[in-house]
Image (cartoon, rainbow, N blue to C red):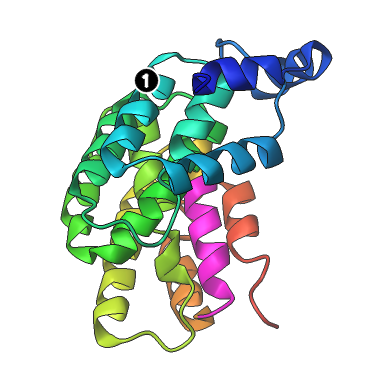
Amino acid sequence: MTAPLDRIKALGDPQKAAEMAAYHKAPRTYLGVPNPILDDIAREMRQTLTLDTRIAEAQTLWETDVHESRVLAAKLFTQARIRPDDAVWETICNWVPTFDAWAVADHACMAGQRRLIADPTRLDIVETWTTSGHMWARRAALVMTLPWTKQNQPKPAEEEARDRILGWAAIYVNDPDWFIQKAVAWWLRELSKHDAPRVRSFLTAHGDTMKPFARKEAARKLPD
C-alpha cells in the first residue's frame, strides 16, 4: 500500500501549491492538493484501516508538517462515531500546542468537535486552553465548541455548556489578537442564528470592549 503522503504528493499541482502558500502564509510545504481529494483519501483510510493504524498514520502525517498531510491527518478523525475514542481525543489534544495557522487548526478542531459531542465532559480539558499562552490554543477552545451554538431548543446541560463557553468568550473580549477577536465574533454569529437573546445580552455587557470589526461581525446575523 502506498504511503498516504506519497499518494498526495503524486496528486500535487505546483501552481496551486504556490497559490496556497501565498494564501495561507504559514511557512510549511504545500503540495497543491484540493480538499475534495483529501476527503476521498481520508474516507478510504477510515473504511479500510484499524483504529490503531489510523491513529499511527495520522500522527505520522501530522509530524511531516506538510499542509495537506496535516489536513488529511485531521480528516482521518472527522467522523461522529469512533469507539473507543480516548486515544483519538488524546492525539487531537496533543496537536493543539502545535497549531500555528488557521486552516490546519480548523480541520483539527472539526475532528475535535465530534469527540466533544461524544463526551461533553471533555470541556473540562478545553477550558484549560482558555488561559494558555499559546494564542492558537485559546482560539481552539471556541472553534472546537461551535456545536454548542447550533441547538434551537437546547437541553439543560447544553444551555449550561453554552453559558460556560460564553464565559470564556467574555474573558477573550480583552484580548487584542485579531484571531481571538474573530473567534469570539464567529461563536456569537453562529449562536445568534439560534439564540439571539443570549447574543444580545453578551453584546450589551461586552460589546464596547470588543474590537469594532468583531462586534459588527457578531451582530451580523441577529434578526431585526
Please determine whether, in this image, residue 48 is positioned above or below residue 65: below
Viewed as shown, does residue 119 lie left or right of 136?
left
Q: Main secondary structure of the magenta part?
A: helix
Q: Is residue 198 magenta?
A: no
Viewed as shown, does residue 117 lie left or right of 110?
left
Q: Residue furthest front?
A: 1
Q: Which residues are magenta?
A: 182-194
Please determine whether, in this image, residue 16 is positioned above or below residue 160: above
Residue at 72% across, 32% down: 34
Position of residue 38 measured from the top left corner of the image (x, y, whole percent): 62, 36
Nearer to us in this view, 88 or 96: 88
What secondary structure is marked by label 1?
A: helix
Residue at 53% across, 32% down: 71
Position of residue 213 measured from the top left corner of the image (x, y, whole percent): 64, 48
Position of residue 89 measured from the top left corner of the image (x, y, whole percent): 25, 45
Residue 130 seen from this side: no
Mark 1, other Cα within 10 Å: few <14 / some 14–19 / many ≥20: some
Viewed as shown, does residue 43 lie left or right of 100?
right
Residue at 63% across, 75% down: 222
Position of residue 125 measured from the top left corner of the image (x, y, whole percent): 18, 48
Label 1: which residue?
60
Nearer to us in this view, 182 or 155: 155
Which quadrant of the structure image shows residue 160?
bottom left
**What amino acid type should be assigned to the residue bearing mark 1?**
Thr
Nearer to us in this view, 110 or 135: 110
Which quadrant of the structure image shows residue 46?
top left
* Quadrant location, the C terminus: bottom right
Q: How many numbered circles are shown?
A: 1
